[in-house]
Image: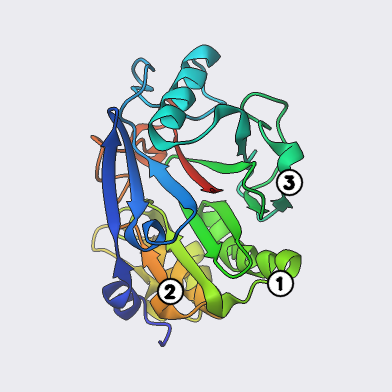
Amino acid sequence: MSNNAAALLSAVRRDAVVRHEGGVGVVMSERLLAEPGLRHGFTTRLGGVSEAPFDSLNLGTNRPEPYENILENYRRLCVNYGLRLERLAIVRHEHGVNILKLGPEDAGRGVTREPFDFCDGLVTDSPLVTLVTAHADCSAFFVYDGRTRSIGLAHAGWKGMFGRIGQKLVERLSLEYGADPKDMVCAIGPCICENCFEVDLPLAESFAREFDCPDIYSVREGRPGKAYVALRAAAVIQLMDAGVPFDSISVMDHCTFEEPELFFSYRRDGKGTGAMAGFMTLD
């Protein structure tokens, strides 16, 4: 596939499934659901105990609300989706590209135990730890290699996307576990879409150069100096650049900005909003 954003986004597999187990909303990838011994998902804002403006399933551990509410939200997620609270390990994101390798000894970090140093991505081959990321417009990379039984999960805002954290996640799985990108299955989580993500034009032009994709951004009449960037196209391109086959990449096709009934959005609601969580674990 050539680096043409419109063609990529038109052709990429869109396979989002929304479930509401016990009232807790989670978006999943059909492709990853078909993989045995794997649990994953990207939460919605539905099914928790948080009060406005964090209503109701806020899973952002740095939000100014009682921590017991956040823990109860995580408990509800775990009970309804077959996870264990004490095994969750959450990134401490800084919109960078640092990726940590986790083992069983890291279970609980950032949720029921002390946080990690700053990181935006996690990899493991242990079924005793569940990888978790936090999001409020930023996307997630879900990567699974069935041959080595290894997984990677990353938080990707525009800085992480520009820094190719998805590509680095694939490369880290290869380095740590001998995984071959040709065997990997990848899903891109919900995020702010190309119709809503407005940036300054120089940044948009930098995206076009970095991903060798002139149509990765668009401009609109009446918005001088501004442009709209297709972050999902950048995600697909960097996974292909890492060696993942195009047919092994899918998109959970929801826009966090456009769907306030399902998602928190920093761009839409500002700092007074909650956060969704991505999760991935081996059975």
In the image, 42: left or right of 221? right
Image quarter in which the N terminus is found:
bottom left
The spot of residue 176 in percent (x, y) is 74, 64
Residue tagged 2: 248
Identified by mark 2, the residue type is: Ser
- Counting residues from the start of the chain, the first of labels 2 and 1 encountered is 1
Q: Quick check: marks 2 and 1 in contact, CB under 8 Å?
A: no
- Counting residues from the start of the chain, the first of labels 3 and 1 encountered is 3
Does residue 242 appear anywhere in the picture? no
Residue tagged 3: 103
In 3D space, how far apart are the residues under numbered discs 2 and 1 (Cα atoms)? Answer: 18 Å
Answer with the quarter of the image where residue 58 lies.
Answer: top left
In 3D space, how far apart are the residues under numbered discs 3 and 2 (Cα atoms)? Answer: 26 Å
What residue lies at 66% left-to-right and 31% top-to-bottom? Answer: 108
Mark number displayed over residue 53: none
What residue lies at 54% left-to-right and 47% top-to-bottom? Answer: 281
What residue lies at 54% left-to-right and 15% top-to-bottom? Answer: 67
In the image, residue 67 above or below residue 169: above
Identified by mark 1, the residue type is: Gly
The spot of residue 15 in percent (x, y) is 29, 61
Identified by mark 3, the residue type is: Gly
* SS at badge 3: loop
- In the foreground, 160 or 106: 106
What residue lies at 38% left-to-right and 56% top-to-bottom? Answer: 33
- In the foreground, 229 or 72: 72
Residue tagged 1: 178
The spot of residue 62 in percent (x, y) is 57, 26
Q: Residues within 10 Å of mark 1 (few under 14, many from 20)?
A: some
In the image, 113: left or right of 237? right
In the image, 8: left or right of 283? left
* SS at badge 1: loop
Answer with the quarter of the image where residue 215 lies.
Answer: bottom left
